[in-house]
Amino acid sequence: MQIVKIEVGDMLELKKPHPCGERIFKVLRIGSDVRIVCQNCGRDLTLDRIKLEKSIKKFLNRDL
Ligand SMILES: [Zn+2]
């Protein structure tokens, strides 16, 4: 998909699920790394921004 700007509060569906099985994450903080929180187990994780952008399947809060 095209590269789009991630914003705080975005709800992301990722191609790779969290170990708990959830694929939906919410964006908490953005810098060179992006912090996201799993919407099932509530754990947060920090990912490299470029890697995260590549692993996004879709934005659930946007019409893309
Ligand atoms: Zn999880």
Image: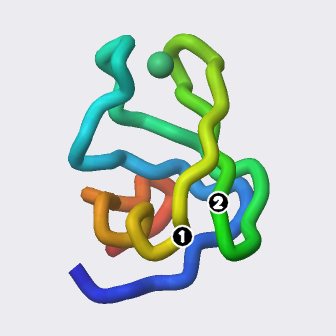
Between disc 2 and disc 1, whose residue precedes? 2
Q: Amino acid at mark 1?
A: Arg
Secondary structure state at the residue bearing disc 1: helix
Q: Please, what secondary structure does the residue beneath circle 2 have? A: strand
x and y, in percent, of residue 37 in the image: 62, 34
- Please give left or right for residue 58 compared with residue 40 in the image: left
Residue at 39%, 66% in the rendered image: 51
Vertically, is 25 above or below 38? below
Residue 21: mark in rendering: none
Name the quadrant of the N terminus.
Answer: bottom left
Q: Position of residue 57 (x, y in %)?
A: 26, 57
Q: Amino acid at mark 2?
A: Val
Asked which quadrant contains residue 55, the reply is: bottom left
Q: Classify residue 45 as left or right of residue 16.
A: right
Residue at horizontal 35 percent and vertical 18 percent from the top: 19
In front of the other: 63 or 59: 59
**Could you give the CA–CA distance between mark 2 and mark 1, rounded to whole angstroms?**
6 Å
Q: Determine whether 3 is above or below 61 in the image.
A: below
Quarter of image, res 20? top left
| Label 2 packing within 10 angstroms: few (<14), some (14-19), many (20+) | many
Q: Which residue is mark 2?
A: 34
- Residue that carries the numbered disc 1 in the rendered image: 49
- Tell me if label 2 and label 1 are in contact, CB under 8 Å: yes
Q: Residues within 10 Å of mark 1 (few under 14, many from 20)?
A: some
* Disc 1 residue: CB within 8 Å of ligand 1: no
Q: Nearer the viewer, residue 50 or 4?
A: 50
Q: Is residue 54 left or right of residue 52?
A: left
Q: Residue drawn at (75%, 49%), measured in percent from left and top?
A: 28
Rendered position, 22 above or below 46: above
